[in-house]
Every structure is written in C-alpha cells, then in structure tokens.
Amino acid sequence: MRANPIRLGVLIALVVVALQALLVPLFAGPAGNLAPRDLPLAVAGPPPAVAALTGRLESGHPGAFAVTVVADGAAADAAIRDRDVYGALVLGPAGPELRVASGASPTVATLLTQAAAGLGDGTPVPVRDVVPADADDPRGTGFASSFLPLAMTAMLAGVLIFLQVRRRSARLLALGTFAVLAGLAGAAVQQYWLGVLPGDYLPAAGVVGLFSLAVAATVTGLGAVADRAGVALGAVTVFLVGNALSAVGSAAELLPQPWGEIGQWLPIGAGGTLLRSAAFFGGNGGAAAAWLLTGYAVVGLLLVAGGRRGLAARSEPVPAAPEPEHALAR
C-alpha cells in the first residue's frame, strides 16, 4: 500500500527539521564554548614560588588547569614532549617563563600565552615554543581542515563497499586495499603537497591508513549486521557526532565535558590525537588512540566477516493472480 504523498512530504520535512535542530547545537555548542577545563600544565621552581603561582592560577582561572609540579625546566620540557602536559611555567630569578607546544594545539598555546600575560607583574612573560607547529601551518588550520575530507571519504568508502560489494571476502579485500591506498595518498598530500604535516612520511601514512580502516570498516560492519539502519548508525555516530566532538582543531580539554572526552573515544578524535603524536612528538602520547582505532578496525572487520552478504531483501507486495479466462467469460 502506497503512502499518502502529502503525509510523506510533511513527515520528511518534520524529520529533517528535527535533525537540523539537533545538529546545530551539536556543532555550534562545543565550538562556541571553548575554554580550558582541567588543562594539564606543569610548574617548576622553588616550592614557595610554585605554591604562590598555583594559587594565583586557581584564583584567576578556577578549574581551568590541572597543575603538575616538576623538578626544573628540563623536566618541564620532557613532560611537554611526552604529551603529559600542554605547557609549563618555569619560575627563575628573572620571573616566570612560559613554555608551550603549538604542535599539540596552536589554540591552547595562544590561551596559555594569554593566561600567563598577567603573571609577570607588569613585565612581559617570555614564551618559548618547545614543540612548534609546522612552519607552513602555524595556526594549525590546515591540519584540522584535512581531517574532514579524510573522515568523509572513509565513511563513503564504507557505505559503497557495503552497498556494491556482496561477498564477504571481497569486502574485506576492498577495505584493506582502501586503507593502504588512503594512508599512502593522504599522508603524501598533507606532507608533500600542502606541507601541513611534519615528521616522517611512513608513520603518518600508517596513522592515516589505520584511521581510514577504522571508519570504513565500522560503517561496513554495522551495515553487514543491521543493513541500512546499521549504515545510518555508523554514519551518524562516526562522522556527524565524531566530527563535532573531535577537537582536532583545538583540544579535548577545551570542550564542555563530558563531550570532549567522549569525542576522544570516537575515531575522528582518536585519529587527530594519534596523527599529532606521530607528526610532532615522535609517537609520544598516542598509544591509547592507536589501540582505540585498532579496536574499531578489528571489530568492524569481524562484523563484516560474520555479517550478511549484500542487502536484506525488501518485502514487495505479492501481485494478485489473474483470474482464468473461462471465469472472465462467465
């Protein structure tokens, strides 16, 4: 029985408007409320001075920083390079010095610089960038913008492989081929063409390939076990929600919680963290993200291997059998 076209049109309009009402705050809410929330920060210096500085930070920026006290400037630099903290305040005879890592997040480096400006008691606080951003992408916008097409194409690959490739073995081969080629091509474009990705090429290609496999395999795997509803669930969760909460262009600690933390449990957030670790920090701080992406990829491939082949058959109305000719003649 066909649906009434007027009712169907109104229903489509209502569903799309409801989706719009949910997506606008999902994207604009976190982006419009960026502020440090328990942002890891190291402080080094004489104990009395450290205690006084910590008190000033807490009173001036309540709840903004999670302060870790380290022995000296060398320990502060080591904590930054290990991605244990985003920056450090080192107290010396001449006053405080701020050390940042714009490679971890140019946005955070700017916020730390602004927060430290009032700590010099009238004199400028010197800033040293321990792990700088790429010279061709000082604000990090190229790095952040490159993740949207990576995620979009990986999701598209997952959808198309589910819809067009029917055999399980062929789907697995297609996903593996896509991951390898996407990693090699994606890293090459970012590093050699756009110049927004420093570091060694092969580790970056491995990260992009793992991220691409995690997204595509998840979408294809959900489709293999839940058909079109699974594909829709994968696209919404992995791409729409994951992109909004990824904090690729800022930092998870700047988003309202728990959304920042949730974003790091989704492939785009984990992929951004792992690629920064590989490109700027020699892999430091990326272990959790690597395991998470591996988990998405493995579970997705297992769902593909154990799921249905092809789409579920649509139920079509059975046409009525024609009456015999002798019955019509009566």
Image: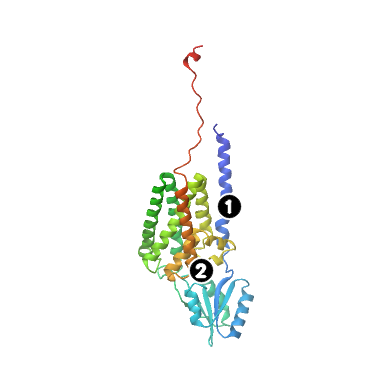
Q: Could you tell me which residue is drawn at 51 percent across and 58 percent down?
A: 266
Residue 115 falls in which quadrant of the image?
A: bottom right
Q: Residues within 10 Å of mark 2 (few under 14, many from 20)?
A: some
Instruction: State left or right for residue 277 relative to residue 9.
Output: left
From the viewer's side, name the closer residue of 135 and 293.
293
Q: Does the image show residue 299?
A: yes
| Residue that sits furthest to the front in the current view | 306
Against 225, residue 5 (above or below) is above
Pick whichever, 229 or 49, lies toward us.
Answer: 229
Query: Which callout, 1 or 2, points at the residue further toward the start of the chain?
Result: 1
Quarter of the picture containing the N terminus is top right
Residue assigned mark 2: 107
Query: Residue 7 is drawn in which quadrant?
Result: top right
Q: Which residue is mark 1?
A: 22
Q: Position of residue 276 (x, y in %)?
A: 45, 67
Q: Amino acid at mark 1?
A: Leu
- The local secondary structure at tag 1 comes to helix
Number of other residues with Cα within 10 Å of mark 1, as a class: few under 14, some 14 to 19, many 20 or more: few
Colour option used:
rainbow
Lateral position of residue 202 relative to residue 20, left or right: left
Q: What's the residue at 48%, 40% (across, down)?
A: 312
Tell me what residue is drawn at x 35 percent, y 64 percent.
192
Query: In the image, residue 246 lies at what x, y percent?
Result: 51, 61
- Going by the numbered disc 2, the residue's amino acid type is Thr
The reply to whether residue 133 is visible in this rendering is no
Q: Position of residue 28 (x, y in %)?
A: 56, 58
Residue extending farthest bottom: 93
